[in-house]
Image (cartoon, rainbow, N blue to C red):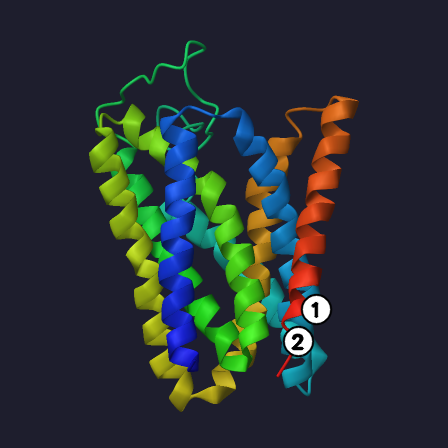
């Protein structure tokens, strides 16, 4: 299978599968499962960043400081972008709109008359577009790196998309419309991947900085967006479970690298 075919397949299959899993979780109100998925996603993201994309970026570069500087700039860039397009889906009245657990105790959704729904779509569409670029950059190096990067990215998309479904329901969307809006948003991954493939084919020197940016993205999402939510449950038993799931996420990325060795 060609590199372009891998990018298209990973973007479509990963997006659809993560969306279906998120819909099952959110529409059946299985909020308790989200913390399990978040812990695993943290491990997958950190494992992919530190065991795969960063080492590959260093291998492609003659100047290690150039890689670390790109990662540093990337982390700052993603912080600024998150503020600008509201990846956390905050709005003026309530900045906990992004929290999947932010709903009434009896499981009902309180409508906010669409105040946060559009921000969810705008933010996630841009986020998915960037994910497509990062997936393409990884596949441009080799299939193994592309597969591992795709798994890590879509692992964190499941709890994120489930939270988005809840926010859209809070905004007054029907279940059908919420699913369709998320489906359209996920297509941005495919568009970003195809555009990046066409661009990187002519400008190979951009592959290394894109890998560094991919690492920055995964590190930032894990450390800034996902880990703080785990600290809301400081109990020892819960902490042990979280650590084990994070390690499981890291181990799955390491094992995937072993099953799909570098070409």
Residue positioned 72% across, 54% down in the render: 251
Q: Quadrant of residue 32?
A: top right
* Position of the C terminus by quadrant: bottom right
Relative vertical location of residue 196 with respect to residue 175 in this rendering, above or below: below
Q: Position of residue 204 (x, y in %)?
A: 48, 88
Task: Say if 4 sits above or below 258 in the image.
Answer: below
Residue 87 percent across, percent down from the top left: 41, 45
Q: Which mark is residue 192?
A: none
Residue appearing at x 41%, y 39% in the figure:
22
Q: Which residue is mark 2?
A: 261
Mark 2–mark 1 contact, CB under 8 Å?
yes
For label 1, the SS is: helix
The answer to whether 192 is drawn above or below residue 204 in the figure is above
Q: Is residue 82 left or right of residue 231?
A: left
Q: Is residue 151 left or right of residue 104?
A: right
In the structure shown, which secondary structural element does the residue marked by tag 2 occupy? loop
**The N terminus, quarter of image:** bottom left
Q: Which residue is mark 1?
A: 258
Measuring 67% from the left and 55% from the top, which residue is drawn there?
A: 252
Where 97 falls versus 155 (above or below)?
A: above
Residue 62 image-quadrant placement: bottom right
- Which residue is at the front of the view, 262 or 85? 262
């Amino acid at each position: 299978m060609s590199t372009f075919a891998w990018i298209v397949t990973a973007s479509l299959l990963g997006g659809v599968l993560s969306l279906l899993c998120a819909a099952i979780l959110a529409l059946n109100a299985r909020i308790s499962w989200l913390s399990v998925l978040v812990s695993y996603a943290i491990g997958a993201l950190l494992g992919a960043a530190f065991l795969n994309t960063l080492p590959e970026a260093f291998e492609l570069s003659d100047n290690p400081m150039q890689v670390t500087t790109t990662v540093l700039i990337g982390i700052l860039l993603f912080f600024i972008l998150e503020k600008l397009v509201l990846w956390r889906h905050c709005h003026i009245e309530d900045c906990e709109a992004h929290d999947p657990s932010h709903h009434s105790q009896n499981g009902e959704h309180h409508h906010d008359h669409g105040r946060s729904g559009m921000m969810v779509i705008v933010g996630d569409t841009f986020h998915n577009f960037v994910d497509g670029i990062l997936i393409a950059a990884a596949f441009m190096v080799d299939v193994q790196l592309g597969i591992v990067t795709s798994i890590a990215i879509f692992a964190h998309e499941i709890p994120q998309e489930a939270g988005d479904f809840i926010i859209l329901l809070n905004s007054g969307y029907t279940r059908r419309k919420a699913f369709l809006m998320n489906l359209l948003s996920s297509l941005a991954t495919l568009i970003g991947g195809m555009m990046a493939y066409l661009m990187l084919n002519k400008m190979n020197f951009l592959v290394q900085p894109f890998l560094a940016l991919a690492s920055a993205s995964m590190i930032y999402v894990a450390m800034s967006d996902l880990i703080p939510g785990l600290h809301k449950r400081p109990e020892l038993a819960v902490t042990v479970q979280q650590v084990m799931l994070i390690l499981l996420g890291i181990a799955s990325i390491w094992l995937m690298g072993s099953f799909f060795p570098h070409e």
